[in-house]
Amino acid sequence: MSRRRQPASDSLEMLLDTMCNTFGGIILIALLISLFARDTRQTDPTATQNNIEDDRARQAMAGAEARRKLLGAQLADPRFKERAELLQQRDGLRQKAEQARRQSADTATEQTPEAAQKRAIEAVRHLTVTNDALRKYIGDAFRDAQAAEQKIRDLQRQRENQVERLRFPQERDSGRQSWFIALRNGRAYPLFYFQPASIDSRVRNTGMIAWTDLPNDEVGVQFKAGAGIDLATSPQDLLNALRPLPRQSYFVYLVVFEDSFAAATVAKKAALELGFEYGMQLMKLDADLKLVRHGQRPSAL
């Protein structure tokens, strides 16, 4: 009878298989991590460039700090200060020498005949321009003066045309009776109307004037508002009032208040137009006009 082999009770095959599979997996994982890390470094150049720039910046800062310390030490050294002052003085002397050389060259150039001739030409040209400018200025001033004189003459003519001069000849006794015309508020107020049938050939103008008998044989005269002859619009009315008056027996006597000088000019023209002599008396605005029954007769002009 054959003898059967008994299966082993414990075997290491499964353990070996487990160990090999686990170790292989670990190695595979390690290889994958290594490959992934290398690929990451190759595919991220920005991080590497930034690191390089950071290193360079740190090196530059370190170098600047070292130079700063070196310069601070040199500034603290008295010998360096003296050397810096000497360098500044040397630069100043160089600049002065260069300026002196340029001035010497300019002087030498100016002393040449060509330079003298050029200066003379420039001086003549400048004088010519100045002379022309002065001539133009004098001509303009002369023309302006002529224009101003012409304007003054024109203004004088305009004034003479607008303003009529009053003639005051020597006062004289004409032997004629006065015919009073008051000029107030730009209006003419004949004090009387001519009536040959009356005792003294005249009657009071009561339509334009309010008469008041006063003591001492005086008569007060008050001008009625809105009455009188408007010489600005109706100078013919004054001519009509004077026309019946005989020129051989009367002369026109104008009593002119301060507000009626223009009206006095019109009244004087009317009297002269009719051939009357005239006299004139100026009155203030606040003055009262009074007539005396028996007094001195005014004179004609």
Image (spheres, grey):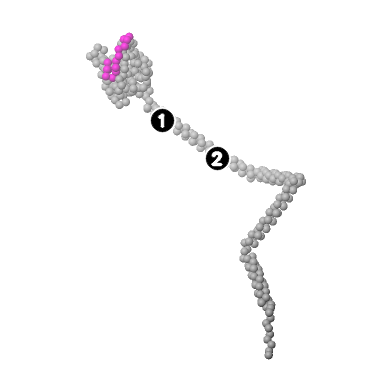
Tell me what residue is drawn at x 63 percent, y 68 percent: 36
Q: Report the number of discs.
A: 2
- The image quadrant that residue 109 belongs to is top right
Q: Residue furthest front?
A: 1
Q: Does residue 219 lie above or below 269 as drawn?
A: above
Residue 97 drawn at (x, y percent): 71, 45
- In the picture, which quadrant includes the C terminus? top left
Q: Amino acid at mark 2?
A: Val
Foreground disc of the pair 1, 2: 1
* Label 1 residue SS: helix
Task: Tell me which amino acid carries mark 1.
Answer: Asp
Quadrant hosting residue 46? bottom right
Q: Is residue 271 magenta?
A: no
User: Is residue 177 among the parts visible in the rendering?
Assistant: no
Residue 214 seen in the current view: yes
Query: What span is colored magenta in the figure?
Result: 204-217
Question: Which residue: 37% across, 16% down?
Answer: 170
- Which residue is pictured at 32% across the width and 10% down the height? 215
Residue named by callout 1: 154
Q: Which mark is residue 67?
A: none
Disc nearer the start of the sequence (1/2): 2
- Please give the residue where the numbered disc 2 appears in the rendered image: 129
Q: Is 205 colored magenta in this rendering?
A: yes
What SS does tag 2 mark?
A: helix
Q: Nearer the viewer, residue 202 or 146?
A: 202
